[in-house]
Image (spheres, rainbow, N blue to C red):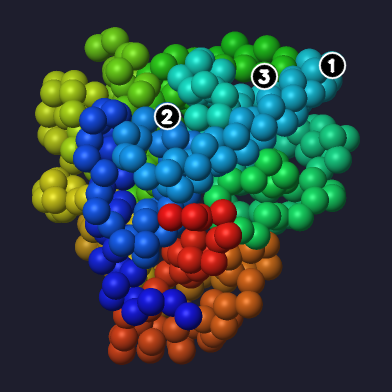
Amino acid sequence: MLPPLKTVKAGLRRTTEALAAELALARPDTPTPSWNKLEWQLASAAAVAHGISPLLSRRCGWQKAGWHAFLAAQREHVAQRQQRIAALLARIDAQARSTGLSIVPLKGSALHAIGLYAPGDRPMADIDLLVREADTARATALLEELGYVESFAQWKHRTFKPADGEAFAGLGEHRDTPVNIELHTHIHERLPVRTIDITSRIYPRKAHPGLNTYPSPGALMCHLLLHAAGNICGRSLRLIHLHDIAMLARRMAASDWEALWDEHATQAPWWALPPVRLVARYYREAIPASVLRRLERDSNVVLRAVSRRQTLTQVSCSALWLHALPGIEWSRSLGEAARCIGHRIRPTEEAVKERADMVRTQVWLQGQSWVTLHHGRRMLTWLTRPVPRMDTLYVVRAALESPALAI
């Protein structure tokens, strides 16, 4: 039995904000919270959901034996899984070189490659790869030769999974979790209905066969910010996203930030303001004041006002209740807002298929009656009572039931 959801909601907010402050400060002398057992369990759930449990094992100064044992075990699992990921990337590189295929490993893979994280610090749910659209068939054949099969496709990417292996059903990271691969031909996000595409900034102009790096630190930052923007818009941001941005920002020169205002872009990077503001809220001095001022000028009045007050909890899975119209404040016009509402009332065929694929493939949706209800029934429920997020409830239940948590 779950505790009262109001208690869970308040506990998630309290523990999430405390974890964010602890990770950003990384001070060994911060006082240990006087939380009860439930709050420590919710803190574990939040750390897992936000992808920061391995980092906390080295950066958290709280004196709580069971807490530290859990974090240390998480870091060990991530370190062992990272070895498998590195070996798989080496095989992909070798295969791509032999076939003349150019590939760009994205996000987490790139951050590890430049030494931003030590092995074991940062979990990776999967490997993201970018190829030219014309090379999709060759990339698919390469993955199939490595023992991968396509699991599902959506507008952002195609997901491949190992032909054998089962997802780990439990709390947090596990060394044996299969390594999925997401194959991209574009780097883009819908905010909330307008598509922002930055592929031309990410794919190298002179790509060579094998694995390629981003063209510049600024290009990598563009991708991290757009990815975070999409997650903020959908209320699915993770603290690890903010940490990635803060860590990279501290390495960047002033000139690197100019990649945000690429001369070939058709519009200013208005979408970067909310993630940059969140990073500045939790990681002080990570973002240059000049960058923040310039982004504020690029953004519209509504997004400037909303993002000024946002917290990590509000735009992540730590906010327990589902939102009826997530991301509508990102609309750039009344027409976009109307389309956002229309898609929520009557989902597109693409959205219906994507939802069905999620129900079929995601372990946290298995056996949940809510997700298989008719859309009209779900809408009626939204209008009459708060509805909890299934992904959040899954990790909370896992934390409450986990035998590994002796807190």
The residues bearing labels 2 and 3 have C-alpha atoms spaced at a distance of 31 Å
Tag in front: 2 or 1: 2
Q: Report helix, strand or loop for mark 3.
A: strand
Give the image location of residue 299, x and y in percent. 18, 41
Q: Quadrant of residue 144?
A: top right
Check disc 3 and give the amino acid type: Leu
Q: Report helix, strand or loop for mark 2.
A: helix
Q: Which residue is mark 1?
A: 98
Q: Which residue is mark 2?
A: 58
Say whether disc 2 or disc 1 marks the residue closer to the N-terminus: 2
What residue lies at 64% left-to-right and 71% top-to-bottom?
366
Say whether disc 2 or disc 3 marks the residue closer to the N-terminus: 2
Question: Could you tell me if residue 135 is visible in this image?
Answer: no
Q: Number of callouts in the render?
A: 3
Q: Nearer the viewer, residue 393 or 186?
A: 393
Q: Is residue 29 above or below residue 259?
A: below
Q: Which residue is mark 3?
A: 211
The residues bearing labels 1 and 3 have C-alpha atoms spaced at a distance of 12 Å
Check disc 1 and give the amino acid type: Ser
Q: Quadrant of residue 380?
A: bottom left
Q: Quadrant of residue 61?
A: top left
Q: Locate residue 380 relative to residue 177 in the image: left or right.
A: left
